[in-house]
Structures are given as C-alpha cells and as structure tokens.
Image (spheres, helix red, strand yellow):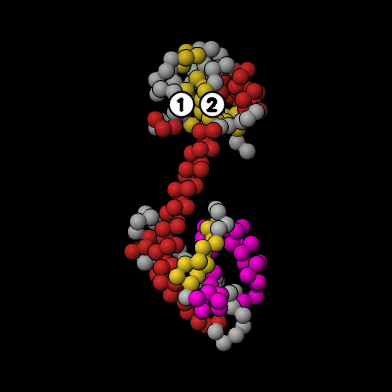
C-alpha cells in the first residue's frame, strides 16, 4: 500500500509497490508455500491510510505492506501480519522473500494455535449427565460412544443442541484408540468407537 501525500514522489511509491507485487507473484517465492501469492497495489487516493488499514483488517488481508516516503528514503517497507499486528521493517530488496517466509510462518502459527485450542477443549465423556454439563461449561469437543442409531443422535440434538461434528479417522484427531468397546452415552447400547459431538455457534 503506497502511502501517497499528493506530491511529486507519489509515482515512485507506486512504481516500487508495483515491482514488489510483481516479484511476489514469482513462483520462486510462492513455490515453497504450495500456493500462489496474490498481491495487489492499492491505488485508492480517496481514503486515508487508517481507513484502509481498518478495511484490510475486515477483508482479512493476511499481510499488509506499507510504503511511505520515509520508507522509500530508508529503502525499506513496513509489513504487518494480521494475526500478530506486529510491524516489521524490511529492506526492499528482501521484501518478497521475507513476505513469502512470513506467510508460511503465519500458516504454521495459526495451525498450531488451532491445534492447541482443540486439545484444550477436547474431552472424553462416558456419561450423558457429564456430557450435558461439559457442553455448558466449558463447551468444546466431546469424544463419546454412540450406537450409530439416528434416533439417539436426534434425541441428543433436541435435548442439547449438540450434533456429531465428525468421526475421527486420523490418530492425531482421537483421544482414545480407534476401536474401543463402550456404551452409547444416550441409550447404553454397544458401541465400537467414539464420535465427536459439539455445538455449532
């Protein structure tokens, strides 16, 4: 985002921004990510930088790149990751490589944060009363035995607003063994594995 002041150097800002956007689309930088990087130069002169920052936050732009006249004098750009809000000052020559690296790091950080939250709010439950209490406080993902009857699932949904979110297949998604005999938390019939119940909000 070139931060133009309506002066003679504004075009220089746009030119540097265009060059950086072009570099970011180069597979050399996006190749390690597994997806292409999309970069757009903001040429809007009607709105203030503060308004644009807020707009980008709402849209969900992962990394905002700012380039003002002072940045140009110092031969740098300012980048801000949406997930941390931390400003970094990067030499223009290293900007494309750094932004690509930060996008990869951001993906890893968000994935790790999501895994930690899932782990914190995942519980093994074997009793229907405990199931109802845990749904209310603290909420989360309840790993429970289920008899595979639609009637039980429907009763649980009507009574608690919780539904089956998934049947864990991957070992990393399970808190218990893949095959584990137990009893359906609702009707008490035999069950050979657990499913994950949760409320949707």
Give the quadrant of the N terminus: bottom right
For residue 29, what is the image quadrant? Answer: bottom left
In this view, the residue in front, 178 or 146, is: 178
Give the quadrant of the C terminus: top right
Q: Going 64% across and 26% down the picture, which residue do you hit?
A: 160
Chain-order first, disc 1 or disc 2: 2
For label 2, the SS is strand
Q: Please tell me the numbered disc located at residue 175.
A: 1
Instruction: Residue 73: say if magenta.
Output: yes
| Residue 18 against residue 79 in the figure, above or below | below
Q: Going 39% across and 64% down the picture, which residue do you hit?
A: 97
| Residue 80 against residue 118 in the figure, above or below | below
Residue 195 percent coordinates (x, y): 49, 26
Residues marked 1 and 2 touching at CB (< 8 Å):
yes
In this view, the residue in front, 72 or 21, is: 72
Q: Is residue 150 visible?
A: no
Q: Is residue 81 visible?
A: yes
Q: Categorize mark 2 by other alpha carbons within 10 Å: few (<14), some (14-19), many (20+).
A: some
In this view, the residue in front, 51 or 152, is: 51
Q: Please tell me the numbered disc located at residue 123.
A: 2
- The residues colored magenta run 45-74
Count of number-bearing discs = 2
Residue 164 percent coordinates (x, y): 53, 29
Which residue appears farthest toward the front when viewing the image? 74
Q: Categorize mark 1 by other alpha carbons within 10 Å: few (<14), some (14-19), many (20+).
A: some
Q: Please tell me the numbered disc located at residue 131.
A: none
For label 1, the SS is loop
Mark 1 vs mark 2, CA separation in Å:
8 Å
Residue 51 percent coordinates (x, y): 66, 66
Instruction: Residue 113: say if magenta.
Output: no
Q: Going 45% across and 56% down the picture, which residue do you hit?
A: 103
């Amino acid at each position: 985002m070139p931060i133009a002041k309506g002066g003679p150097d504004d075009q220089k800002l746009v030119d540097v921004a265009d060059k950086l956007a072009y570099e970011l689309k180069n597979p050399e930088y996006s190749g390690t990510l597994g997806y292409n990087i999309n970069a757009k130069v903001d040429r809007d002169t009607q709105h203030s930088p503060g308004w644009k920052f807020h707009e980008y936050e709402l849209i969900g732009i992962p990394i905002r790149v700012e380039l003002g006249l002072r940045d140009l004098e110092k031969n740098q750009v300012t980048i801000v990751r949406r997930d941390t809000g931390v400003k970094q000052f990067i030499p223009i020559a290293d900007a494309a490589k750094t932004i690509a690296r930060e996008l990869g790091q951001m993906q890893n950080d968000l994935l790790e944060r999501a895994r930690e939250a899932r782990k914190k709010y995942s519980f093994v439950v074997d009793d229907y009363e405990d199931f109802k209490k845990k749904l209310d406080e603290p909420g989360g993902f309840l790993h429970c035995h289920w008899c595979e009857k639609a009637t039980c699932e429907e009763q649980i949904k009507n009574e608690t607003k919780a539904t089956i979110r998934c049947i864990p297949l991957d070992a990393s998604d399970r808190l218990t063994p893949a095959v584990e005999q137990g009893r359906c938390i609702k009707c008490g019939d035999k069950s050979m594995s657990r499913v994950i119940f949760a409320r949707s909000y």
